[in-house]
Image (tube, helix red, strand yellow):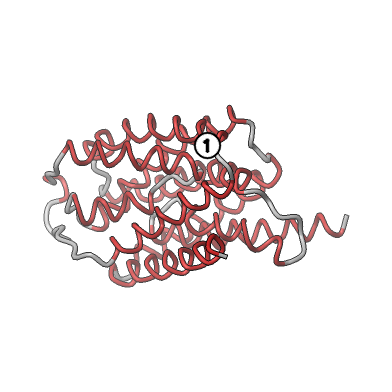
Amino acid sequence: MGMDIMLITVLFAIGFIGSFISGMVGIGGSIIKYPMLLYIPPALGFLAYSAQEVAAVSAIQVFFATLAGMLAYRKGNFMNTKLVLYMGVPIIIGSLLGGYGSKFLPDGVINIVYAVMALIAGVMMFMPKKGNEDGDFTKITFNRGLASISAAVVGILSGIVGAAGAFIIIPIMLVLLKIPTRVAIASSLAITFISSIGTTAGKIMGGHMLWIPSAIMVIASIIASPIGAKVGKKMNVKMLQWILAVLIIATVIKIWLDILS
């Protein structure tokens, strides 16, 4: 029984830290929690979860974390409805396909998809951003075709790893669509939330759900996400981008090392 209490504490801590950071930088947190869930429990002597199971827990958790984050951001008027629609619809179709299709893939492939996505996101974080950071957030224009196509691709890939793809959606908005950072963060939460509905449904249909760990992570994220969002609103935008980038790169290195060894 003592072991169970320990494991619950570890899962809660992973959920809390991951959600705090994700609330702060406006991502669903799977980019942080996926590697934490994969590596921390076995490092502490608990049973390791498979990539399939980790992806499923991530999916459910992201659903609730983004819901909480979205509620925290809705007062700021930063959410762009057009952007959410043009990216949200293709991403949910993609993520349903990816979420269900992932059951036909081996663990190694899931980890590689994750590593490639994280790598692209990491590189994109350092590309020059053209979005106007001040000014009228209601009059934002963007390339609709590009927004929809990129969202569909991200949806399929993120459905596979149970991430909601926000960690790639934000760089795409900043770099390709030239959206201001705060609008990108708020809108990506809504898009990620929509995407996680597809991913979670796909995972449940694929039969990979671990309900107890999911519940622990969800409770942790509901507490931590809004705290993170509050801290994030007071922080410097550049600082947020650096935190994100460092986290992404550290994860990518770890996963590639694992794949190559």
Label 1 neighbourhood size at 10 Å, few (<14), some (14-19), many (20+)? many
Q: Report x, y in % for residue 117.
A: 40, 53
Looking at this view, name the residue that lies furthest to the front: 261
Q: Amino acid at mark 1?
A: Ser
What residue lies at 47% left-to-right and 56% top-to-bottom? 31
Is residue 128 placed above or below 174 in the rendered structure?
below
Q: Quadrant of residue 81?
A: top left
Against 214, residue 25 (above or below) is: below
Q: Residue at x 15, y 45 (%)?
A: 138
Residue marked by disc 1: 102
Local secondary structure at mark 1: helix
Q: On the rendered image, what quadrant is the N terminus found in?
A: bottom right
Q: Is residue 168 left or right of residue 197?
A: left
Q: Residue at x 22, y 41 (%)?
A: 147
Residue in front for this viewpoint, 261 or 213:
261
Q: In the image, 67: left or right of 108?
A: left
Rendered location of residue 111, percent (x, y): 52, 52
Residue for point 11% across, 45% down: 139
